Image (cartoon, helix red, strand yellow):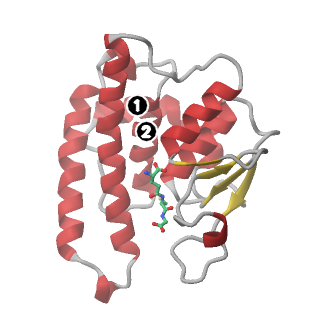
Amino acid sequence: MKLYITETSPYARMARIMVLEKGLEDRVEILPARTRQAGSPYYEINPSGRVPYLICDDDWRLEESQLICAHFDHLAGPPAFAPPPGRDGWEVRRLEALARSLLDGLGVWGRELKRPEADRSATVVAHERERARRLVDLWEREIETPPMAEPFRNMAQLTLAVALEMDARLPGFDWRPDHPKLAAWLAPFARRPSFAATLPGASKTG
Ligand SMILES: N[C@@H](CCC(=O)N[C@@H](CS)C(=O)NCC(=O)O)C(=O)O
């Protein structure tokens, strides 16, 4: 299988973490994609131009981090990250959606900061900074809900951990000093080999 990524994409990072957590390194080739560039040869591979993108050995093609992570989870061994049945599963999905709101907003913020200064919208930056501020405040309370506790076993944990670690590359996303419970929660996830190996700058790919 081929997994297209960029090194800095948090969505692609979730898929890469899942490859490592599920022991799929020998089956998944990680390939860099050139995104957001006119005429990129990557558009011939994936017309949407986005990452992560998975091409399976039979040329079955999957886009979207959630779908790709779920596919990896089911490929090797019993699914370890799928929501449990019933109300507990809905709770995990609720928390995943909340984490995704943070991640998506940070993505918009980061993209805006990468634009040339003259094209950058101060309004968008301020809007996303405020969204992130409200959401990390909310997460400081939500982090004690049972599905977020270790062990590592669901997409809510994965999505939130990857979103919070975006502070390394997003000036202004300084959530740690005022959110001690969140910082304490993140620490053991960040120490996992799958997280350390996929932090932007950790690999030579991308
Ligand atoms: N909802 C998608 C989001 C993927 C996404 O937005 N990826 C960004 C990188 S962080 C991308 O490929 N951007 C390229 C573009 O917008 O052309 C997912 O979860 O996989």
Q: How far apart are marks 2 and 1 (CA)?
A: 5 Å
Q: Position of residue 36 (x, y in %)?
A: 51, 74
Residue at disc 1, secondary structure: helix
Q: Which residue is drawn at 39% across and 38% down?
A: 160
Q: Quadrant of the C terminus?
A: bottom right
Q: Where is residue 57 in the image (x, y as percent from the top left)?
A: 78, 45
Q: Quadrant of residue 202?
A: bottom right
Q: In this view, does 61 lie to the left or right of 127?
A: right
The amino acid type found where label 1 is placed reads: Ala
Q: Residue at x 56, y 37 (%)?
A: 69
Q: Is disc 1 surrounded by few (<14), some (14 to 19) or many (20+) residues within 10 Å? A: many
Task: Classify mark 1 as within 8 Å of ligand 1 or not, answering yes or no.
Answer: no
Q: In this view, does 134 lie above or below 186?
A: below
Q: In this view, does 139 lie above or below 41?
A: above
Q: Residue at x 40, y 31 (%)?
A: 156
Q: Which mark is residue 30?
A: none
Q: Is disc 2 surrounded by few (<14), some (14 to 19) or many (20+) residues within 10 Å? A: many
Residue at disc 2, secondary structure: helix
Q: Number of labelled discs?
A: 2
Q: Is the Cβ of the residue at disc 2 closer than 8 Å to that at disc 1?
A: yes
Q: In this view, does 106 lie above or below 26?
A: below
Q: Name the residue under label 1.
A: 156
Q: Position of residue 127 (x, y in %)?
A: 18, 62
Q: Name the residue under label 2.
A: 159
